[in-house]
């Protein structure tokens, strides 16, 4: 079996090397010619898998994407050719939630407000949104959820990934009216009753109250970038945190400059999430060929560089939270990296360079936080945020 794997898929040798001949190629260089003698293709979100790409792939029988989203894959084209498909839902969901909490804590410090005093609206209560709602609720932060497809399917209440019951669903208009922070975590759906393309279009963006924070770590095309840029450049009374963009990697430089925290589609780029995604596709390929999955996920994960952090008395809750968040992942580094590299190399090349050379990052759950003489409030806040909290 010949397996073509995106060059940036981690731990591919450990997983796919024993299944056949493995070939690496940068994701943006994977074209129809590269697939002529390939039996299995493993990609990330930057490779568009459509009818044109697989037109000459006569041996191709499996496509896997090491990502949550699948909007870069033409599922109908694969089905028509009888090509099996697998994705990695939830693989990096925890990392995206880490990113959201870190970004909001950074913005709160920068702008002088407290996260505990804000109401957060989450649009999309799936793998990422459900986990975010669960962590926010555990941290004692007021939150609401909006997910019309789940309501249409009969869901009356939101539920976290752990099965935790959360506040009931509300419509997008009600969410915009009631919330200080809006977090978008929807798939990209271009047509139909629950289309999400430009879900936050000019009208919705105009309805945002002054002081609102709009955070998008879902899909770039769910926000009308031109309308958001106009609001930010005009009234300038709302704030944006953007990890995903229209027209990646050639994103709108003017919008980037107006965005409080601008990052190059790296919210889910933890080592844990990436390797979890690789392992999920490895297992799917093994199932497709009736082979045993001999490599376990634990074998792909190394020990974190920072395993334990001890906090003494005297730290307030949000101060302790920021300290722990930044010990694992400081989102300001990612913002600065995009700004630096896009200015040095040009927008598209700089955007991709940031992703390609992304530094080691672990998830909050890998850090044990030891609290000495700290109140129960701090323990609940840190535990709710996703850290492993112990006393002493």
Image (cartoon, rainbow, N blue to C red):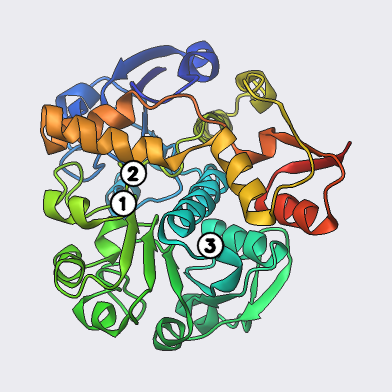
Is residue 343 placed above or below 24 in the rendered structure? Answer: below
Mark 2 Cα-neighbour bin, 10 Å: few <14, some 14–19, many ≥20:
many
Mark 1 Cα-neighbour bin, 10 Å: few <14, some 14–19, many ≥20:
many
User: Do the numbered discs 1 and 2 sit on residues whose CB atoms are within 8 Å?
Assistant: yes
The one of 228 and 50 positioned closer to us in this rendering: 228
Give how far across and how far down residue 131 sits, in percent: 61, 58
User: Do the numbered discs 1 and 3 sit on residues whose CB atoms are within 8 Å?
Assistant: no
The one of 285 and 224 positioned closer to us in this rendering: 224
Left or right: residue 44 compared with residue 28: right
Q: Is residue 283 visible?
A: yes
Reading the chain from its start, which is encountered first: label 1 or label 3?
3
Mark 3 Cα-neighbour bin, 10 Å: few <14, some 14–19, many ≥20:
many
Determine the image quadrant of residue 60: top left
User: Do the numbered discs 3 and 2 sit on residues whose CB atoms are within 8 Å?
Assistant: no
Assign a secondary structure to mark 3: helix
Q: Quadrant where the N terminus lies? A: top left
Give how far across and how far down residue 150 sits, in percent: 53, 76
Furthest residue in direction front, as rendered = 314
Residue matched to label 2: 265
Assign a secondary structure to mark 2: loop
How far apart marks 1 and 2 lie (CA) works out to 5 Å
The structure residue drawn at horizontal position 25% and vertical position 27%, both measured from the top left corner, is 353
Residue matched to label 1: 244
Reading the chain from its start, which is encountered first: label 3 or label 2?
3
How far apart marks 3 and 2 lie (CA) works out to 17 Å
Reading the chain from its start, which is encountered first: label 1 or label 2?
1
Residue matched to label 3: 129
Determine the image quadrant of residue 313: top right
Determine the image quadrant of residue 4: top left
């Amino acid at each position: 079996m010949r397996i073509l794997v995106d060059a940036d898929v981690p731990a591919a040798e450990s997983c796919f090397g024993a299944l056949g001949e493995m070939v690496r190629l940068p994701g943006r260089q994977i074209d129809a010619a590269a697939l002529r003698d390939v039996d299995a293709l493993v990609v990330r979100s930057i490779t568009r898998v459509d009818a044109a790409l697989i037109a000459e792939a006569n041996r191709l029988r499996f496509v896997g994407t090491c990502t949550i989203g699948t909007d870069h894959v033409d599922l109908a084209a694969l089905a028509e050719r009888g090509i099996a498909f697998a994705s990695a839902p939830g693989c990096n969901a925890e990392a995206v939630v880490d990113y959201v909490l870190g970004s909001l804590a950074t913005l709160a410090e920068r702008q002088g407000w407290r996260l505990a005093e804000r109401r957060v609206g989450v649009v999309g209560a799936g793998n990422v949104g459900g986990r975010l709602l669960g962590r926010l609720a555990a941290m004692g932060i007021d939150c609401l959820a909006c997910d019309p497809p789940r309501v249409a399917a009969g869901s009356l209440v939101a539920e976290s990934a752990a099965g935790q019951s959360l506040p009931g669903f509300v419509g997008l208009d009600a969410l915009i009216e009631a919330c200080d922070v809006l977090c978008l975590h929807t798939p990209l759906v271009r047509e139909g009753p629950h289309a999400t393309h430009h879900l936050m279009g000019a009208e919705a963006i105009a309805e945002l109250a002054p002081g609102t924070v709009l955070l998008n770590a879902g899909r770039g095309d769910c926000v009308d970038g031109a309308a958001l840029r106009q609001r930010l450049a005009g009234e300038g009374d709302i704030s944006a945190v953007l990890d995903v963009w229209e027209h990646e990697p050639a994103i709108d430089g003017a919008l980037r400059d107006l965005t409080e925290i601008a990052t190059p589609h790296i919210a889910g780029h933890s080592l844990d999430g990436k390797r979890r995604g690789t392992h999920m596709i490895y297992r799917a390929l093994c199932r497709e060929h009736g082979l045993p999955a001999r490599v376990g996920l634990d074998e792909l994960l190394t020990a974190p560089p920072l395993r334990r952090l001890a906090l003494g008395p005297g730290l307030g809750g949000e101060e302790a939270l920021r300290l722990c968040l930044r010990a694992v992942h400081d989102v300001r580094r990612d913002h600065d990296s995009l700004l630096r590299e896009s200015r040095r190399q040009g927008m598209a090349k700089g955007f991709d360079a940031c992703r390609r050379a992304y530094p080691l990052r672990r998830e909050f759950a890998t850090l044990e936080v030891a609290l000495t003489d700290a109140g129960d409030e701090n323990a609940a806040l840190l535990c709710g945020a996703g850290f492993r909290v112990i006393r002493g």
